[in-house]
Amino acid sequence: MANQIDCIEKQDRYDPSEAIVSVGGRNADGTRWSISQKEAIQRIKSRQNEFYVSKNGHRVNVLVATSRFGNEYIKTENDDHEPNNLLELQSCRVAA
């Protein structure tokens, strides 16, 4: 199942691989969902879920990457868009 991510919660970190704490979106019935970045990584790796963001009407898939320090994190696939699609999303507190 593919879920659109439309908000994030992040902490102030320079390294994008450490910035995102959790991601969220909207269910088909309009209710909100939110999961930790760690859980999103597990769901992507186990193929339980797919995640994406919508940018200018285009679907951009979210994937698992590994930082130079060996930490796994989520990011969007390369779509030639700067800044980072996930890090520029609004706070989930605002989206609620």
Image (cartoon, rainbow, N blue to C red):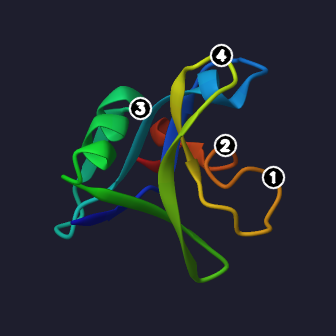
Distance from Cα at disc 1 to Cα at disc 4: 22 Å
Label 1 close to label 2 by CB (< 8 Å): yes
Distance from Cα at disc 1 to Cα at disc 2: 8 Å
| Quadrant position of residue 85 | bottom right
Distance from Cα at disc 3 to Cα at disc 1: 19 Å
Residue corresponding to mark 1: 83
Q: Which callout, 2 or 4, points to the residue nearer the camera?
A: 4
| Quadrant position of residue 39 | top left
Q: Which callout, 1 or 4, points to the residue nearer the camera?
A: 4
The relative height of residue 89 versus residue 37 in the rendered view (above or below) is: below
Residue corresponding to mark 4: 69
Is 88 left or right of 45, judged from the image as shown?
right
Residue 87, label in figure: 2
Q: In the structure shown, which secondary structural element does the residue marked by tag 1 occupy? A: loop
Label 3 close to label 4 by CB (< 8 Å): no
The relative height of residue 19 versus residue 34 in the rendered view (above or below) is: above
Kind of residue indicated by mark 4: Phe
Distance from Cα at disc 2 to Cα at disc 3: 12 Å
Q: In the structure shown, which secondary structural element does the residue marked by tag 2 occupy? A: loop
Kind of residue indicated by mark 1: Pro
Mark 1 Cα within 10 Å, few/some/many (few <14, many 20+)? few
Counting from the top left corner in percent of width and height, residue 56 is at: 67, 79
Counting from the top left corner in percent of width and height, residue 25 is at: 37, 54
Label 2 close to label 3 by CB (< 8 Å): no
Residue corresponding to mark 3: 37
Q: Quadrant of the N terminus?
A: bottom left
Q: Considering only order in the chain, which callout, 3 or 2, is on the residue closer to the N terminus? A: 3
